[in-house]
Amino acid sequence: MAGRFATLTLALAVVLASGPARAQTLEEPGGRQGYYLALGGYGVVDHTTEKGESLGAWGGSSFTLRLGQLLTRRFSLGLQIDSGGAKGRGQQGTFAGLSLEGGAAVVGNLAVRGGVGVGFVSLRDPAAEGAPTRGAAGSYYLLGASYDFFPGRTRRSGGFSISPTVQARFLPSTNVSTTLLFIGVDFVWWTGLPDNQLNLPDAEAYRRR
Amino acid sequence: MSGRGTLARGAVAVGICAATLLPSAVRAQGKAQVPAVAPAPAEVDAAKLSKAPKQTKFVEAEYPQEAVDKGITAEVVLLLDISAAGKVTGVGVVEPATLPGLGFDEAAMVAAQGFEFSPAEIDGKPVAVQLTYRYRFTLKPKAPPAPEPVVAPEGAAATPIAPPAAPKPQVVNYVGLLRERGTRLPMPGVLVTVFREIDAKPVGFEATTNADGKFEFYDLLPGEWRVLIEAPGYYPFKTIEGIEAGLATQVTYYAERASYNPFDVRVTAARPRKEVSRTVLAAKEIDKIPGTAGDPLAVVQNFAGVARSPLGSGQIVVRGSAPEDTRIFVDGAEVPLIYHFGGLRSVLPIGMLDAIEFYPGNFAPMYGRATGGIIDVQVKKLEPKKVGGYADVSLLDTGVFLEVPLGKKGGVALAARRSYIDGILNAVVPSDAPVNIISAPRYYDYQLLANYRPAPAHDFRAFLFGADDSLKLLFKNPADLDTAVTDNRFSASTSFYRSLLTYRYIPNERFENSVRLSQGRNWFDFKVGKLRFDLNVYSTQLRDNVRYKLADWISVSAGVDVLYSKSDVNIQLPRPPKEGEPMGGNFDLSDTLSAKIDNAVFWSPAAFAELELRPLAGLLILPGVRVDHFQRTSQSPAQPRLTARYQVTPQVAAKGGVGLFVQEPDFEETDKSFGNPNLKAERALHYSAGAEFKPRPHITLDGTVFYKDMSSLVSRTDTLTTGPMGPRPLVYDNGGTGRVYGLELLFRHEFTDKFSGWLAYTLSRAERRDSGETSSRLFDFDQTHILTLLGSYSLPRNWLVGGRFRLVSGNPITPVSGSVFNALSDRYDPTFGPPNSARNQPFHQLDLRVDKRWIYQSWILSVYLDIQNVYNRANPEGLNYNFDYRKSKVQQGLPILPILGVRGEF
């Protein structure tokens, strides 16, 4: 199952990226342009199974750092690092991951993203003194969506956006499998494109270097 | 070539056309049509051209009248096939005019057929090339009438067109250099435009950069001028430059390429393909293959015909032959290994490589002493245009590379790399671990390459390279080790170096001679307790290869290949298990054999000859023979070989081959202590036949069926022989036989401007029959199905993504049927079922790789993330048993492994 999912992710990435704009085509200035750096805070719902048995739904929080670049007007590639914790039913869980993420703007500033990487989850029972920490490490999959609001954008290209985000993560393994649902907000800085890649009026395009 | 001076902006008039040889004239061949000539052209890197084609005759296209009437200008990008004589033999349209239906494309194609060029050359020999050519239709201003444009001299000073220039001495007052951002390479043949308004009238001038990227304007009026540089494939460069009276403005501009992917430099040239099965991968393509963590030679394991080797073994198993049956060469000189520590890294960095050539069988007579396959790593032909290099830092090691030009006739490059896994392990291994890591595992390698060509006919090359691996462990509790081990130290080290001198002389098209002399040392040292294996080998190899073209239909190649070695050996080990015998079986560490040999000298001279016959158009027949002398077996077997290739159509070729291949037994097999000094050489007959279909220049479908008949294989025997001390075991004889047969399919998309990849599938069966046995068994590495699918795709903004998926049958294993308690050794000894009668589960794995490049003015920063085993498949590599062999657990292979690397190049 996990293998098919990863293969599908790769195939989608290739298909989505198969029709990029011509390299030297100049772009109209806009908000979602250039590199992005995002810091996100989320509430987390964690559902973990251990040796096939559900441990129930836990609540928690998570922080995420995302960085990447818009490859075309629509598609992006980047890295995502996340870390967080959750607890419930007298147990605590922590998780972290590093993933490659690919995104696509569906309509306007609404973007979906998917990714794959490596992550771990560890579980412990704080009441059971000396009990060993359980957990798993392995492949880490993500699927999510966000919308970028650019409040008061003044830059010609790029700027600051506030992005409500919903994201799901899945870490399958033999003993412990975890599904995480994140809901929160990303604060994103878009660097914009350099002038030579923007379709600008001559008065702005020709400037002394 | 300089463009004609034409007004670029704001003018409408009857037209002339300007043609510009693109800066990427010998690039961007991805959409190219290959000339329909046989033999099929092979790809040659543009950097290999010793002389670029230069236009000697220009034909002006007829400007479509409708376009003149409407004042429409246009550009058409053509792809020209240029023969070795400089004639245009084919014209295609790469980028048509923006407005269709006006006749620009047709007019440009007709005109281009009349162009003539001075031929491109490689090593002084004219070659056919393809180049892209931008044909620009522009309109001359109507009023005021412009002076007739003057063709700019070489060096490309611009000619002012408007306003009319006064007859006075020309003063150059604006000089510039145009370089590519990141690489700092000069950009020749690029149009530089300056323009402004004077008295409300637009005025503009053009100049074309020369071979050094230099451009000049003269007599520009003082004031601010807008500068526009629009090179195809580059982002436009726009700036404002101030010209002051009486002063010359000097500038250097850096134009940014739209894509710095590795697939955008390519030239095609006619080079006959001779071998039945050969895979060639250029360094630019190798570098970005996923699953290799940036290692150039790890790509070998993705070729059709190569079995997947177990994790950490670094073995290369070709068409069912044992790893030691495949030879590895670096520029024709044999080397003992190409990988550090079981395949962790190769011993040569990407900066030193030109290509990897792989022959799974039926190789030419110049290669010998092997019954399996051949890997020949081609070292880079140094022609640096600038001082350049890179530093590469990954989680495993750090490497540096630097190359320096020696005028225009050569260059020097040096590189080095060192791992720091030992440092990381020392930091992370807990203090209560049962082992102390003294040096674990540490490797380094180094290379020095010098290349000098005093004249096109002479090419001198010197290459020094070497590698060193070391591993030392101290076990805290000796009781953890076998009782036969009396010490708690374990150490293993491997080191080698080679110095290689090459002289290539190609005075004309008919004659070619290559001489290679290599000298080096291999040193293997392994110690644990009283067990040791210490081998010190000094080797020298001389190879000379002459080729003479007697007539158009016949050429002859001949040469000698002499290998001399002197060895010192000190061994105290149990007899090693043979192929087909289970590891960890009756491997008694207390039952060791000893041998100490000093100054053992071995000669292995060989001579070879091959004819190249072309009796019919498209038919190539290569009969050849190689004679090796093996000192240890006192044999001089002649090995006749024949391959043939028939180009049925420009797209379809049939091929086949048959030949005898012989190699000496391993050293320990002929040693009187460990083996049988009367052994003879092993033999293999290779048969193969196949077809190639090339529907597009960059797409190849290749199918080959093969059969390998092996005889005189060294095999374990229980026979006793009589010696001076009475009867003793013969240990080995030549009673083994084997056969391998199968099918290889390759569907390859060679690198274009966006994509590179292939699908390789091998269906095969490899069997052995050991001495005295009546039935065959499977070979240790028999893998019925081997499927490899890989590709890399270049995305905008200098991203590159790639993936590799492998699906391979599990290796055969010998099942344990039970165990018997051995009171003498106080342990259980396993009993085995029929050898190799079971299999591991199939192996499958997906690897992903993402590269990102940042382009700065004079250097480039790359970061890559290579994730191996993305979906964390627990691939079985074998079984581990408990003490009495009643329970077993699957030994798992590589888990998901992300490897991050950073490279800076300048």
Image (cartoon, coloured by chain):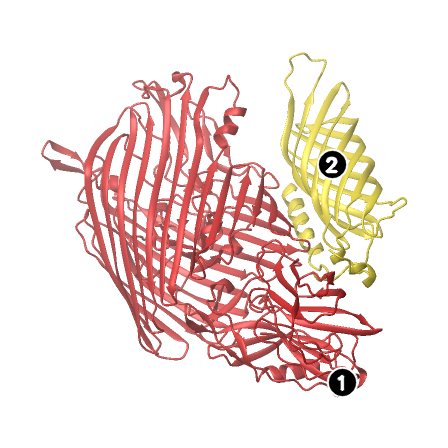
Q: Disc 2 designates what residue? A: A65
Circle 2: residue type: Leu
- Regarding residue B316, the answer to whether it shows in the image is no
The image quarter in which residue A128 lies: top right
Q: Specify the quadrant that holds the N terminus of chain A.
A: top right
Vertical placement of B298 versus B511: above or below? Answer: above
The extreme right residue here reads A152
Residue B583, position in %: x, y? Answer: 37, 34
**Residue B422 left/right relative to B80:** left
Please rate how many residues cluster around mark 1, counting C-alpha atoms within 10 Å: few if below 14, some from 14 to 19, many from 20. Answer: few
Q: Tell me whether circle 2 and circle 1 mark residues in contact (CB < 8 Å).
A: no
Circle 1: residue type: Pro
Q: Disc 1 designates what residue? A: B145
The extreme top residue here reads A129
Residue B283, position in %: x, y? Answer: 49, 55
Which is nearer the eye, A34 or B93?
A34
Q: Which circle marks residue A107 in the picture?
A: none
**Residue B726 left/right relative to B63:** left
Vertical placement of B593 versus B310: above or below? Answer: above
Label 2 sits on a secondary structure element that is strand
Q: Colour of chain A?
A: yellow
**Residue B162 left/right relative to B534:** right
Q: Nearer the viewer, mark 2 or mark 1?
A: 1
Q: Which chain is red?
A: B
Q: Residue at x 28, y 30 (%)?
A: B574
Which is nearer the eye, B865 or B824?
B865
Vertical placement of B232 versus B109: above or below? Answer: above
Q: Specify the quadrant that holds the C terminus of chain A.
A: bottom right
Please rate how many residues cluster around mark 2, counting C-alpha atoms within 10 Å: few if below 14, some from 14 to 19, many from 20. Answer: some
